[in-house]
Amino acid sequence: MSLSNKCHQIIYFILFTPLLSSCLITLDVNKLNDRMFKKYDKNQNHAFEQTEFQPILKNIYRFEKQTHNLLDKNIGREDYLNSEFLAYDNNKDGHVTLVEIQSYDRKKYFTLKDENKNGFLDLDNEITFITNRRAYKSLVRLKYAFVFEEKRVISYEEYVIKVKKGLDANHDNRVSLEEYHNFNPIYCGC
């Protein structure tokens, strides 16, 4: 597997799964980002112009097609490359930054998980997915701030309650894109 494919699959995993799951990966994401920028960011400005971002988008397209995660199942590669760059470039300045990549990919992942397309994720499904005991144990072992209260490790039951409060900030028993977006950094103690 080439470096670009391997990097993209890892990036895809990190960005397209809740960040709690990505905490379980024991790689240095900063080093991965640095390698990605060294390889594709030809002018080293830590932003991708459209021509620099094309190889990354080609890998994303291939990966999403293989995993059946394309939002538009019938889109061709060239149309995908053009539309996705514009979608990633949130501020329309002709450059895509890491923040824009993460933001758009979270929205994209949310859209894929929103099965009935009502703009909300099912709270119980998200809690079940996020709060498996293996994830909790990994966060404790890796000493992520989310599972600590001062110096005390919170119990699994407290962890589930904390996840629910974080995901459902307005207590309406569903997860909006804003709640989902705001909760992601919390899991990893970021």
Image (spheres, grey):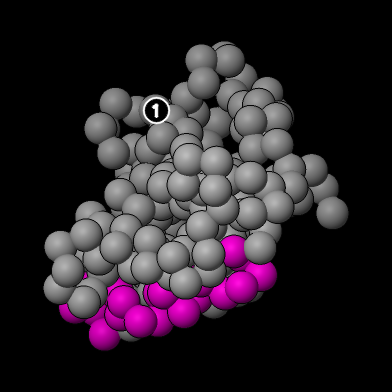
* Secondary element at tag 1: loop
Question: Is 79 situated above or below 115?
Answer: above
Q: Is residue 144 magenta?
A: no
Q: Residue most toward the bottom?
A: 116
- Viewer-proximal residue among 187 and 2: 187
Q: Is residue 117 magenta?
A: yes
Q: Is residue 94 left or right of residue 2?
A: left
The magenta stretch spans which residues? 116-136
Q: Residue at x 15, y 73 (%)?
A: 172
**Residue 45 pos. (x, y %):** 51, 15
- Viewer-proximal residue among 30 and 154: 154
Category of crowding for the residue at label 1, using alpha-carbon neighbours closer than 10 angstroms: few (below 14), some (14–19), many (at least 20):
many
Q: Residue at x 39, y 28 (%)?
A: 95
Which residue carries the number 1 mark?
95
Residue 100 visible, this orientation: yes
Q: Residue most toward the right?
A: 1
Q: Residue at x 70, y 30 (%)?
A: 31
**Residue 181 pos. (x, y %):** 32, 52
**Residue 38 pos. (x, y %):** 68, 23
Q: Is residue 119 left or right of residue 68?
A: left
Q: Quadrant of residue 22?
A: bottom right
Q: Is residue 171 left or right of residue 46?
A: left
Q: Quadrant of residue 28?
A: top right
Q: Residue at x 28, y 39 (%)?
A: 90
Question: Is 9 situated above or below 163?
Answer: above
- Viewer-proximal residue among 42 and 7: 7
Q: Amino acid at mark 1?
A: His
The quadrant of the rendering that contains the N terminus is bottom right
Question: Is 36 situated above or below 127?
Answer: above
Tally the marks. 1
Residue 11 visible, this orientation: no
